[in-house]
Amino acid sequence: MAEEKELRYDPAVIEPKWQARWAADPGMYAAEPHSSGKPKYYVLEMLPYPSGQLHMGHVRNYSIGDALARHMWMRGYNVLHPMGWDAFGLPAENAALKNNTPPREWTLSNIAAMKRQFQRLGMGFDWATEVTTCFPDYYRWNQWFFLRMYEKGLAYRKKSKVNWCPECVTVLANEQVIDGRCWRHEDTIVEQRDLVQWFLRITSYAQELLDDLDKLQGWPEKVRTMQRNWIGRSEGTEVEFSVENRSEKIRVFTTRVDTIFGATSVQLAPEHPLVIAMSSEDAGLREQVAKLLDEQKKAREAGDIGAIEKHGIPTGKFAINPYSGELVPIWVANYVLIDYGTGAIMSVPGHDERDFEFAKKYAIPVRRVIAPADPAADEPELPFLSEEGVLVNSGEFNGLSCHDAQKKLQEIAKAKGFGEATITYRLKDWGISRQRYWGTPIPIIHCERDGIVPVPEDQLPVLLPDNIEITQQGGSPLAKLSDFVNVTCPKCKGPARRETDTMDTFVDSSWYFYRYTDAKNNTAPFDPKTAQYWFPIDQYIGGVEHAILHLIYSRFWTKMMRDLGLITNSEPVERLFTQGMVLKDGAKMSKNRGNVVSPDEMVARFGADAARMYSLFAAPPDRDLDWQEDGVAGVSRFLGRVFRIVTRYAPAARAGAQQKPDNPQGVALKLLRKLHQTTAKITQDFEGRWHFNTCVAAIMELVNEIQSADAQLVAGEVPAPVMYELLRTVVLLMAPFAPFLAAELWEELGGQGAVLRQPWPKSDPGLAKEDEIEIPVQINGKLVSLIRVPAGSDAKTIEAAALAEEKVQARTAGKTVAKVIVVPGRAVNLVVK
Ligand code: ANZ
Ligand code: ZN
């Protein structure tokens, strides 16, 4: 046979060619209007921070989302697959300090660079809906939302203890402190400071945020659990103790009011108002309290307040148990936190581990007030923690179960006015003030006469001034800009000062996905009808590191917008997928470790298709992936094989393009079967499991099988219509994973129009069926034969096949078959008399 000149697979030629064609056709990835009549599908990947370079984690994240988007386009959906930039934030300011480039310039040039990377990777985004959060047309709506929240009391200012990152030189929200460290600086310990700050009242949605987690069946259980714990709902009772010889009262929060007869002390947080009052009268106490506070601060900063070594100081004063009238000593303790519950507890060493430890240390009495419900049971050792017991040593309440006693004691407290049932949440309001420049200005004016005055809506946006000297010391850079700061009060027209704090950038990402639905709107954040059409997001894809941060803020924001009447959905995201990390040599890629693999380099050497397909193939999407260059090279060789097979047989196959395969036999049938099995598998995986690694493996198997039939193909044993169906379907199945190659080969096959406008291949169940399987046939428990039936056959088919079998017929002749028991796929048993 004459040597054929083989075409070479060259992604460096193919990919830029298609990239240019796609760029010239912006409608290609555009969402259609609601009137399209197609079902909608909103697939979204978390938007990147424009650092200047995509990393491999991005490539993986966006390859998953893009594969899904392409698949859904081919399934006939109206797909919204947008992209944008989380463009405010600290790195821009740090870069400005380092290279003397203004944050805006730095950010915009990074965006341009990353957009080029996205396009080179062939990501199918609808750039017409691009959102850039640092543009005034976007952040003005942050300000607008802020004003709406201010009106409703959902935005407020208070002095409080806040987390301060010395590296960021700004305040952080609780959610941004991870194990006592800054979320951006894993080596920087976060300090505590007292500052006046703006807060958003996320706690007024605490219960709903918790309840609705149950509805989020399409979210990973892991993420829901993390949110549940973060919200930290706790049902209990607040009880007021009077203080002997003083007018102040101490309100404690307890989950076990049934143990109150066992309270042998009351413990106050070092910053409790009563402690402050007593300290002001007693220098000795003041000094000791300062020490406790310091210990507490250190433990907090180490992220381990729960394991603090417990210390306390007796104040010499006594509190009065409102149920028993008993006097118990008041202590100050370092393990009581000012910002949980009421900042004061009743200490019950007989029934609480921590109180027990403390009582032993300071020789405080330990008293049993709960006994096992079963009177015959042994007295358990103290501390006895069970809530399934009955009260003892508790006066008139003796004999009540813990649960009944809780109810009863709550009723009494309520009736007598010294307490009530309460619910406490660990979740705190979201501190959004940042003492930095590159963020959304908070639209507030401070007037000496009128106090806090919101910027009137017609004066929005409050523009972030452009030319500004970035400094890291001495407060917000904005505060030094007199043009910005000095304003007239909208109310009294007198001189006033503009707020110089900017908003946490998590505000930007709390609602950006609504803006995508109507990104050009300049009279509203978005059109409610359009948002209603697209929401909720059908599939959201991103990193699990946002389980608590972005994913709780954006749920809150959605509920807030619903209550403003902007939307009707209560949750933004129907299904959430959190992909695994991309590692190199078992470790997270990082500049410090010097193990960063650059997407640009991978694309230059192997092509975008290979890099994308490898990132889907190398591990299940929810697992960590260890980047192996050999693996990328392997995928690239595979793509080359597909390229050669299709280009070699396309001319012959095209002759069969207009005909249906007609009663194929032999190798043609075998290949068709494999094709339909592969189609079924991939289709099913897109429906939810997302085992793209096995999808890609299945395509590889199929291609191998086609290749190993090469001699028969050359000999013409596979008719052109079968050949055409084989090649065409391979190309379409590859389209979500390797879009460039699919486009090229589609053209090679003479296909009309864009690949993603082709209907997704259908698997013929008859052909996709596994081949036959063997089933043993028993008569009265004895194996007599094996029958062959198509896999997946039902009981009736199996029974008929068994009764028709020769040996079975011989042995049942003249006898009665009393019963046929079929275990489909496993065995047939005949009861014969
Ligand atoms: C008395 C008691 C007896 C308690 C008992 C427990 C068991 P959760 O479930 O996490 O909400 N507590 C309340 N406020 C506190 C604060 N500011 N700092 C430190 N501890 C505080 O825990 C609630 C329990 O934690 C409360 O119930 C209180 O101790 C303690 F057998 O009150 B308990
Ligand atoms: Zn004023």
Image (cartoon, rainbow, N blue to C red):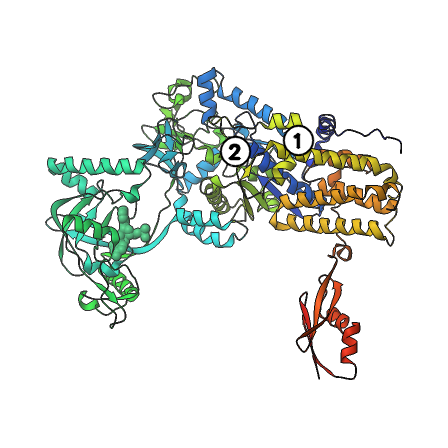
Quadrant location of the C terminus?
bottom right
Q: Which of marks 1 and 2 is in front?
A: 2
186 with respect to 832 (left or right):
left
Tell me what residue is drawn at x 66 percent, y 45 percent: 695
Q: Residue furthest top?
A: 100
* Dot 1: element: helix
The numbered disc on residue 827 is none
* 494 vs 422: above or below: above
- Residue 228 location, x and y as percent? 42, 50
The quadrant the N terminus occupies is top right
Q: Quadrant of residue 618?
A: top right
Instruction: Identify the amino acid type marked 1.
Output: Ala
Q: Can residue 518 be seen in this view?
A: no
Q: Is residue 511 left or right of residue 301?
A: right
Distance from disc 1 to disc 2, alpha carbons, whole Å, reads 22 Å
Q: Residue 532 at what x, y percent from top left?
A: 59, 46
Q: Where is residue 383 in the image (x, y as percent from the top left)?
A: 23, 57
- The tag on residue 585 is 2
Determine whether 260 is above or below 580 in the image: below
Residue 250 horizontal/vertical position (percent): 20, 49
Q: Is disc 1's CB within 8 Å of ligand 1?
A: no
Q: At 47% from the left edge and 49% from the top edge, which residue is drawn?
A: 224
Q: Is residue 192 left or right of residue 656?
A: left
Q: Is mark 2 on a helix, strand or loop?
A: loop
Which of 516/100 is in front?
100
**Label 1: which residue?**
608
Q: Which residue is drawn at 27% across and 43% down?
A: 337
Amino acid at dot 2: Asp
